[in-house]
C-alpha cells in the first residue's frame, strides 16, 4: 500500500469520514434504492483502490500514476452513468431490453477496472479466476456437453457484468457490502479504538497462562477472541502474533510450531461467533436463514475447532515437557476485572439480534455504546490520531471487500446465467456415485483447490454456487451445506501450497514459509474433521433434542481429542505409529452415526492400550 503525501492523505481521510458517516447512517436509518446505494458505495471505494495500491513495484509510492488517474476517471464515469440512468434502468427487462452501445463500452471498462483493482489489492489468483470465468462467458458456445451454452454477444455479456441488480458488480453481493459489512468493519474498528482488543488479549493471558505450554494456549485464546472482531486472518496474525509468536518461542516452542499455532488460531476467528467475518452475512442472504440462527448453529463447530487445536498444543507441550507461563507474565484477576466491561458490546449485539433487530441495526447501536464505554478510562478515550487511523483503516478494509464482492458478483452472475454452476454440480454428483462421503471429499477437494490464493469470502461464494446444489441432492440441509463449504474456505488460508495466513506468521517467526504451511495444516487437521462430523450428525448444528445435541457433541469432542493425539504421537505417554493409526481410525469411526461404529472405535482404543508406557515410541 502506498505511503501517500499529505494532500492525498487528507483526501483519503475526507473520503474515509464521508464513507463512515454515510454507511453508519444507512445502517441505522436506511438508505436509497439498491442501485443508488450500491453505486455510491462503489463510487467512494473502488477509485480508492487506485489511489492506495500501486500497480507494480515500479509505480509511484506516494501518489497515483497517470494510468491510475485515468482508471479513476473511467471508474467514476461508469458509476455516475448508473446513478444518473437509474430510473430508466429500473424499468428495463434483464436479457430482453436493448443494451446501449455506451453501456456495452462502460460495462467492459468497468469489468476490467474491477479485475485490476482485485489483482493489485487482493490476489492475482482471484483476478485470474474471475478472468477465466469471463473468458468462459465469451466462449461458452464452443464448450462440450453440459458446459455448452448459446453464444453470448458482447452487449449481453456487459449486461450480465454491469447492469444487473441480482448478480454482477452491482448485484446482491455488493448490496451486502454496503448494507452490512461496512458497519461491521466500523464496529471492529471502534472495538480496537476503545481498547477492547487489548482486554481480550489480557483476558487470554489470565485464563490460559497457568497451563502447561501456556504460551501457545494464550496465543490460541487471544487470536480466537481477537479474530471475532478483526475480520481478517492475516491482520489477526500481525496484530496478535507480534507478541504471541515470540512468547511461544521463549516458552520452548520451535519457530515453525509457534508460527503454525498462531496461523491456525487466527484463521479460526473467521468461524467464531458472533461476527464470523463477511461469510456469515452472505450466507444469511443466500440461504434466507437469519444471521442470528447462523451464529447459533455455528457455535458448536467453532468450539470443536478450537478444542482440536488446544488438544494439539497440549499434547505437544506434554511431549516436549513445556512449562506454564511465569506468574509475573500473567495479569492478576483484579487487573482483568477492571476492564471486563468490554464484554458488554458482545453481549449487547447478541441481545439485539435475539430481540429481532437486523444485523445492521444491532451493529449501529453497539457502535455508539462501545464508544461510550471507551470514555470510562482515560487511557482508552478516543484521540484525533486514533480516530483518523481507524477511519482510514476502515476505508481500506471496505474498499478491499467492495472490490472482492464486485468480482465475485460478476463470477456468480456468469455461473448462474450460463448454467455452469448446475453443470459443475452435476459433475460432482456423478463422480460421487451416490455416496455422500465421497461427495463430501470431492467438495472438500474442490474448495481446497479453489481456495488456493483466493480470500475466504470469494472462495466461499464461488464454491457454494457449485457445492450447495451437489450436497443438496444427497439430502444435506441448506445451512449444513453452506457451513461445510464456508468452513473449508476459511481453512484454505492455512492449506499449502498458498497458505497466506501461515506464510504471514512464518515471516514474523523468521522461518521457512512452506514448511510452516504444512505444519499449520497438520495442527489444524483435527479441525478438518469437524465439517464432516456436523454433516453426518445434524445434532452438532442444534438439530435434535437437548440430550442428543449434548451426547453427540461430547462424542465429537472425544473424536477430536483422539485424532489430535494420533497426529501428534502423544497421549498419556508417547504413542507408537501403530497406536497412532488406531487413534486416528477410532476418531473417524466416532463421528460416524450409529452404535456399531462407536463399538468398533472403542475396540480400536482398547487395542491401542494408551494407558501403558511403551518401550519404543513415535518421535515427532
Image (cartoon, rainbow, N blue to C red):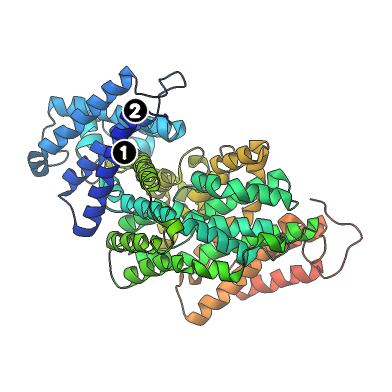
Count of numbered circles on the image: 2
What secondary structure is found at the residue carrying circle 1? Answer: helix
Q: Residue at x 41, y 30 (%)?
A: 119
CB under 8 Å between discs 1 and 2: no
Residue placed at 54% from the left, 65% from the top?
Answer: 303
Give the image quarter of residue 462: top left
Residue 13 lies, with reference to residue 3, above or below; the image says: below
Mark 1 vs mark 2: give the one in front: 1
Q: Earlier in the sequence, mark 1 or mark 2?
A: 1
Q: Position of residue 254 (x, y in %)?
A: 73, 46
Image height of 538 relative to 323, above or below: below
Residue that numbered label 2 is attached to: 142
Name the residue: 23% across, 36% down.
Answer: 43
Q: Position of residue 168 (x, y in %)?
A: 27, 40
Q: Which residue is mark 1?
A: 13
Q: Is residue 502 left or right of residue 282?
A: right
Amino acid at each position: 500500500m502506498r505511503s501517500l503525501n499529505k494532500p492525498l492523505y487528507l483526501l483519503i481521510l475526507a473520503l474515509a469520514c464521508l464513507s463512515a458517516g454515510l454507511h453508519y447512517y444507512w445502517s441505522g436509518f436506511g438508505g436509497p434504492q439498491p442501485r443508488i446505494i450500491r453505486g455510491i458505495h462503489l463510487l467512494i471505494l473502488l477509485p480508492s483502490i487506485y489511489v492506495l495500491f500501486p500497480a507494480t513495484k515500479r509505480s509511484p509510492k506516494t501518489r497515483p500514476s497517470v494510468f491510475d488517474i485515468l482508471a479513476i476517471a473511467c471508474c467514476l464515469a461508469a458509476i455516475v452513468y448508473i446513478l444518473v440512468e437509474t430510473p430508466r434502468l429500473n424499468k428495463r427487462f434483464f436479457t430482453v431490453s436493448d443494451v446501449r452501445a455506451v453501456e456495452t463500452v462502460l460495462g467492459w471498462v468497468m469489468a476490467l477496472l474491477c479485475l485490476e483493482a482485485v489483482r493489485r489489492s487482493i490476489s492475482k489468483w482471484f483476478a485470474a479466476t474471475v478472468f477465466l470465468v469471463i473468458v468462459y462467458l465469451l466462449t461458452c458456445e464452443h464448450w462440450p456437453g453440459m458446459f455448452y451454452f448459446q453464444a453470448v454477444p458482447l452487449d449481453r455479456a456487459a449486461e450480465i457484468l454491469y447492469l444487473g441488480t441480482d448478480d454482477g458488480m452491482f448485484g446482491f453481493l455488493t448490496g451486502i457490502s454496503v448494507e452490512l459489512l461496512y458497519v461491521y468493519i466500523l464496529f471492529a474498528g471502534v472495538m480496537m479504538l476503545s481498547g477492547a482488543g487489548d482486554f481480550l488479549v489480557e483476558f487470554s493471558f489470565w485464563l490460559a497462562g497457568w497451563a502447561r505450554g501456556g504460551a501457545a494456549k494464550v496465543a490460541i485464546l487471544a487470536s480466537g477472541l481477537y479474530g471475532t472482531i478483526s475480520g481478517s486472518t492475516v491482520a489477526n496474525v500481525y496484530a496478535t502474533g507480534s507478541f504471541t509468536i515470540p512468547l511461544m518461542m521463549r516458552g520452548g516452542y520451535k519457530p515453525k510450531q509457534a508460527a503454525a499455532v498462531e496461523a491456525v488460531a487466527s484463521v479460526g476467528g473467521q468461524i467464531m461467533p458472533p461476527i464470523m467475518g463477511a461469510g456469515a452475512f452472505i450466507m444469511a442472504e443466500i440461504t434466507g436463514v437469519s444471521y442470528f440462527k447462523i451464529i447459533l448453529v455455528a457455535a458448536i463447530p467453532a468450539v470443536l475447532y478450537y478444542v482440536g487445536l488446544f488438544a494439539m498444543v497440549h499434547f505437544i507441550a506434554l511431549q516436549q515437557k513445556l512449562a506454564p507461563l511465569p506468574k509475573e507474565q500473567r495479569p492478576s484477576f483484579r487487573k482483568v476485572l477492571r476492564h471486563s466491561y468490554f464484554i458488554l458490546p458482545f453481549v449487547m449485539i447478541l441481545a439485539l439480534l435475539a430481540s429481532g433487530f437486523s444485523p445492521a441495526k444491532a451493529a449501529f447501536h453497539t457502535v455508539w455504546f462501545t464508544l461510550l464505554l471507551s470514555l470510562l478510562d482515560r487511557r482508552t478515550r478516543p484521540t484525533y490520531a486514533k480516530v483518523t487511523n481507524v477511519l482510514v483503516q476502515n476505508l481500506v478494509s471496505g474498499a478491499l471487500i467492495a472490490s472482492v464482492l464486485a468480482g465475485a458478483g460478476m463470477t456468480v452472475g456468469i455461473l448462474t446465467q450460463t448454467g455452469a454452476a448446475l453443470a459443475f454440480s452435476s459433475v460432482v454428483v456423478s463422480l460421487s456415485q451416490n455416496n455422500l462421503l465421497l461427495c463430501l471429499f470431492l467438495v472438500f477437494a474442490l474448495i481446497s483447490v479453489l481456495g488456493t490464493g483466493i480470500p475466504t469470502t470469494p472462495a466461499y461464494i464461488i464454491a457454494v454456487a457449485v457445492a450447495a446444489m451437489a450436497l443438496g441432492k444427497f439430502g444435506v440441509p441448506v445451512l449444513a451445506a453452506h457451513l461445510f463449504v464456508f468452513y473449508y474456505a476459511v481453512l484454505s488460508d492455512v492449506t499449502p501450497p498458498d497458505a497466506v495466513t501461515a506464510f504471514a506468521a512464518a515471516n514474523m517467526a523468521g522461518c521457512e514459509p512452506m514448511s510452516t504451511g504444512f505444519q499449520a495444516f497438520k495442527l489444524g487437521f483435527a479441525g478438518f474433521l469437524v465439517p464432516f462430523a456436523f454433516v453426518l450428525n445434524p445434532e452438532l448444528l442444534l438439530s435434535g433434542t437437548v440430550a442428543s445435541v449434548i451426547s453427540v457433541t461430547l462424542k465429537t469432542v472425544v473424536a477430536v481429542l483422539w485424532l489430535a493425539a494420533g497426529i501428534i504421537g502423544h497421549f498419556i505417554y508417547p504413542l507408537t505409529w501403530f497406536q497412532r493409526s488406531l487413534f486416528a481410525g477410532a476418531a473417524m469411526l466416532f463421528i460416524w452415526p450409529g452404535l456399531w461404529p462407536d463399538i468398533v472405535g472403542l475396540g480400536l482404543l482398547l487395542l491401542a492400550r494408551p494407558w501403558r508406557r511403551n518401550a519404543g515410541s513415535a518421535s515427532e
